[in-house]
């Protein structure tokens, strides 16, 4: 199988967490022409017409986009070890936490992703403040439902940890470092305690290290571009 993906994006990281936990080997491919325009993505659009990462491509060529759908496919096709809790309520909490990430946490960060790609003179403080406020609200939803036994749900790794971990790196490390905003975790003790504890898990630690490295490389490219533009 092949996984079209990038290391700095939270959605493929969620799929990699599952692949690592289940010991599934795949070929990792950065989509050709990714990160520029839709024209440069023409080849990739033939693989996934949605044009986003990740896409899982099976050995017979069938392609599956959308991180949550890929994770559910991998759970069904490779059931052991399961990253879905057996108890229906706990499984629902796993899905709820992942959904909060997809619908609220990421959406709150989108205006900041957009600003970060533009020159600093376009960074209106009101836009940054409004996005940071929405992000704090979204993270407070996680605070309400997050587990207290070292993992998002129960006392072992689930898909929810894969959804949450890369987004917390963006929310509590990348955004404060780029925009000078306070770390939102300081106001969320349960989520902060979860985040400290879950990084002791070797698979979460691996995903976190890959994400931090990719973000650092991307920031270096952005700094280089800014230096050249002066
Ligand atoms: N709902 C999708 C979201 C995927 C997504 O938005 N990926 C972003 C990267 S975080 C992307 O590929 N954006 C298009 C681009 O960067 O050109 C999923 O869960 O897979």
Image (cartoon, grey):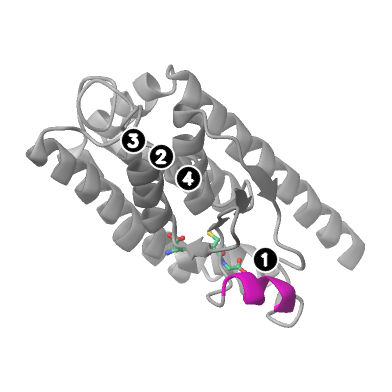
State which tag comes first along the sequence, 4 or 3.
4
> Of tags 3 and 2, which is closer to the observer?
3
Quadrant of res 90: top left
Q: Do tag 1 and tag 2 residues touch (Cβ < 8 Å)?
A: no
Mark 3 near ligand 1 (CB under 8 Å)? no
Chief secondary structure of the magenta span?
A: helix
Q: Are marks 4 and 2 in contact (CB under 8 Å)?
A: yes
Q: Are marks 4 and 3 in contact (CB under 8 Å)?
A: no
Spatial CA distance of label 4 from label 2 is 7 Å
Question: Does the magenta segment cover residue 164?
Answer: no
Residue 79, numbered label: 3
Q: Secondary structure at mark 2?
A: helix
User: Which residue in the protein does label 1 denote?
Assistant: 120
In front: label 4 or label 2: 4
**In the rendering, which numbered label is found on residue 15?**
4
Looking at marks 1 and 2 on the same chain, the residue that comes earlier in the sequence is marked by 1
Residue 134 seen in the figure = no
C-alpha separation, residue under disc 4 versus residue under disc 1: 33 Å
Q: Is residue 104 left or right of residue 85?
A: right
Decide: is 6 above or below 49: above
User: In terms of secondary structure, where does tag 4 sit?
Assistant: helix
Label 1: few (<14), some (14–19) or many (≥20) C-alpha neighbours in 10 Å: few
Q: Which mark is residue 162?
A: 2
Q: Which of the two discs, 4 and 1, sits closer to the camera?
A: 4
In magenta, the rendered stretch is 42-48
- Tell me which numbered mark, 4 or 1, is placed earlier along the sequence: 4
Work out which residue is located at the far front of the displayed protein and give it. Answer: 60
Are the residues tagged 1 and 3 within 8 Å (C-beta)? no
């Amino acid at each position: 199988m092949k996984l079209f993906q990038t290391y700095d994006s939270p959605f493929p990281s969620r799929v990699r967490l599952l692949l690592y936990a289940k010991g599934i080997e795949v070929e990792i491919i950065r989509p050709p022409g990714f990160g520029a325009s839709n024209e440069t993505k023409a080849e990739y659009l033939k693989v996934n017409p949605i044009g986003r990462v990740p896409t899982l491509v099976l050995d017979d060529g069938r392609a599956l986009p959308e991180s949550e759908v890929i994770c559910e496919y991998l759970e069904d096709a490779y059931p052991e070890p399961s990253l879905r809790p057996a108890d229906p309520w706990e499984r629902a909490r796993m899905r709820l936490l992942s959904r909060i990430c997809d619908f609220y946490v990421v959406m709150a960060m989108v205006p900041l992703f957009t600003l970060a790609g533009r020159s600093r003179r376009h960074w209106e403080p009101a836009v940054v403040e409004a996005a940071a406020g929405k992000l704090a609200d979204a993270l407070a939803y996680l605070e309400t439902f997050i587990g207290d036994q070292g993992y998002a749900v129960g006392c072992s790794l689930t898909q929810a940890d894969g959804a949450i971990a890369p987004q917390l790196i963006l929310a509590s490390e990348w955004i404060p470092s780029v925009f000078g905003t306070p770390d939102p975790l300081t106001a969320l003790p349960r989520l902060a305690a979860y985040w400290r504890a879950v990084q002791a898990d070797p698979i979460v630690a691996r995903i976190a290290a890959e994400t931090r490295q990719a973000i650092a490389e991307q920031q270096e490219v952005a700094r280089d571009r800014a230096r050249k533009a002066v």
